[in-house]
Image: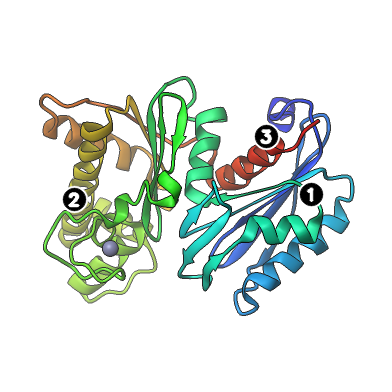
Amino acid sequence: MAARERLFGQGPVVLAFDVGGTDVKRGWVDAEGSLHELQTVPTPVAGGAEAIIELAAETLQQVPEARGFSMVVPGIVDSASGIAHSSVNLGYRDVPFRQLLQTRLQLPVFFGHDVATAGYAEHVFGAAKGVDSSAVITVGTGIAAALIIAGEPVTSRGWAGELGHVQIADGPACGCGALGCLETIASAAAIARRYSELSGNTVPGAREVLERMQQGDPQAAEVWESALDALSQGIQITAGLLGVERVVIGGGLAQAGDNLIVPLQEKVRQRTTVTKLPEIILASLGAKAGIIGSLLRAREITKQ
Ligand SMILES: [Zn+2]
């Protein structure tokens, strides 16, 4: 554990949040570089931006020696300007979070995107370490990619990485208003929903679909297979367009391990002729990637 605990190395004490649709992961790093996790609390969704800023101020009282703060959220987020343009689940619209947090906390603040930041953590400490160009694809309720090209995160002011809303089929309908977005077929939520619709047996998640497939359920196999086909298409598009050397798969679906990665590698190989055939591996930081990345960013914006 010692290596993991001192992950960050020596530097300023910083505090960070990873804000999700249901809960807020909180942590801080001490001067020696050890990570300390604080209790995860429910996201104060109803209170909007003000409530999350107040939560940051309250949490800072627990770590008064912190010299920098970082917060990452889902949605369309511009880390360059520190503005959350649109976080549908959280109800944020064009909120200048970095500025508001700096004023409230009187500290340097990083504000960014959760998946992009988790991907950055995988690049620095995890499964995407050691390669110049990578895509960290998070497959959970939705699908999004964090891109590192020539060693630099590519965010395009928050618009890059929306792989989940790349259209790859004629249906089903997506929450975004389009038809056949990748995440309507290949997200963990879509796998559960599509199996439930096809079989008439409601399952809570993709894990149950995988289990049923392993027990010989042909409908589960059909849904799983089509999800992996769609995902392999998304990976081939990504690798063909950007030439990434490595694709790292994270998010809830990554818990399927080799049941996901091995057939996915084969499907991408079959699709790939002249475009880049990327290495495809599982993420290594798991659910902590977001908070680790957020802390990393807090360290970076904080002067010693
Ligand atoms: Zn969509």
Q: Which residue is disc 1 drawn over?
A: 107
At a point 14% along the width and 30% down the height, the residue shown is: 272
Whether pointer 3 and pointer 1 mark residues with C-beta atoms closer than 8 Å, the reply is no
At a point 71% along the width and 36% down the height, the residue shown is: 299
Q: Which residue is disc 3 drawn over?
A: 300
Task: Identify the element where label 3 is drawn.
Answer: helix
Q: Any atom of ligand 1 within 8 Å of the CB at mark 1?
A: no
Closer to the observer: label 1 or label 2? 1
Q: Measured from the top left, where is residue 9 in percent x and y?
A: 74, 25
Whether pointer 2 and pointer 3 mark residues with C-beta atoms closer than 8 Å, the reply is no
Task: Identify the element where label 2 is drawn.
Answer: helix
Q: Measured from the top left, where is residue 145 in percent x and y?
A: 38, 45
At a point 20% along the width and 37% down the height, the residue shown is: 236
Regarding residue 39, the answer to whether it shows in the image is no
Q: Amino acid at mark 1?
A: Leu
Task: Report the front residue among 163 and 102.
Answer: 102
Task: Report the front residue among 110 and 26.
Answer: 110
Q: Amino acid at mark 3?
A: Glu
Q: Which residue is disc 2 drawn over?
A: 225
Q: Amino acid at mark 2?
A: Glu
Q: Residues within 10 Å of mark 1 (few under 14, many from 20)?
A: some
Q: Is residue 58 above or below residue 11?
A: below
